[in-house]
Amino acid sequence: MARQKITVQDVQQAKDERRKLVMMTAYDYPFGLMADEAEVDIVLVGDSLGMVVMGLQGTTEVTMEHMIHHIKAVMRGCKTCLVVGDMPFMSYNTTIPAAIANAGRLLKEGGCDVVKLEGGADFAPTVQAIVKAGIPVQGHIGLTPQTASALGGFKMQGKSAAAAKQIIDDARALEQAGAFSIILEAVPAPLGKLVAEAVRVPVIGIGAGPDVDGQVLVTHDMVGLFDRFVPKFVKQYTRIRPAILEALAEYRQEVREAKFPGPEHSFKMSAETLAELKKMIA
């Protein structure tokens, strides 16, 4: 039986049933297709594409046009996962009307199911307004990459009791504002457990320990395709970059030695046609 499309209600039900949610990133058609075949629950078209796909140093240069382009590509392959479109830096940070309009663009032009934005209690009014406009919102607290420089860099958050309490308060504020789930990034594992227990909506961790409601990883990190750096919380389930480099080296060698293409990779022409052709061009 073919799997049905995952919905926001399915995500909430997973927490109610204590079933762990599986989330991954995708930025193009092939990875969207594989996410569907692997029966992943949620796919994030994240602004992390700035680093792992576009070669930028961070996420702040990613635009709405970039996000829409990549969301459309993922949606062509991803038919049953719940697809989250990341709201890029400054697409929701200025005014609430602009945030609603940009969230609407991701759904209307990109085709994703829901949007995600970074920030805690300070952005609760923005989340509430977008939800009121009919667009489901996933929150993102803890380490927020778009504003990492203001947090001291890509470092663990919630180290002190006061900082940890603020993250719990942020989660509660997002839940009250109507967020259907929350990404929690780079916090101590005990804090991850407390955050998941503090709210009724699913908390999906990335570097937040095992006691949250699900996990998300950047797929390029998980499969060893991106090697600029590997965060502490990433497990590399395979390393495909060395295999690709090995294949490219073999291809280069065979081309230079005239071993590729061989007869099995070439189209044939009859001797008669070839003879006739040579007469025509003589």
Image (cartoon, grey):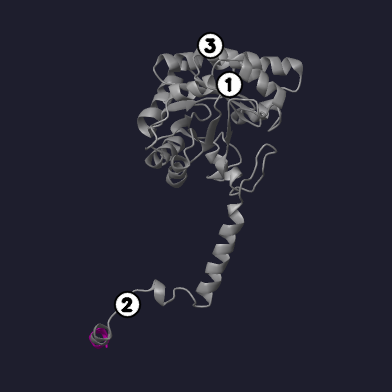
Say which label, 3 or 2, has the lower sequence index: 3
Q: Tell which of 6 and 267 is nearer to you.
A: 6
Q: Which residues are magenta?
A: 277-282
Q: Is residue 130 left or right of residue 215?
A: left
Helix, strand or loop for disc 1: loop
Q: Which mark is residue 268?
A: 2
Which amino acid is tagged 1? Gly
Whole-number angstrom distance, CA of label 3 to CA of label 2: 69 Å
Asked if labels 2 and 3 touch by Cβ distance under 8 angstroms, the answer is: no
Disc 1: CA contacts within 10 A as few (<14), some (14-19) or many (>=20)? many
Extreme residue toward the right, this view: 160
Which amino acid is tagged 3? Gln
For the point 62% across and 20% down, the residue is: 196
From the top left corner, tell me how far across and down residue 71 is, in percent.
43, 37
Mark whose residue sits in front, 3 or 1: 3
For the point 70% across and 26% down, the residue is: 189
Q: Tell which of 48 and 217 is nearer to you.
A: 217
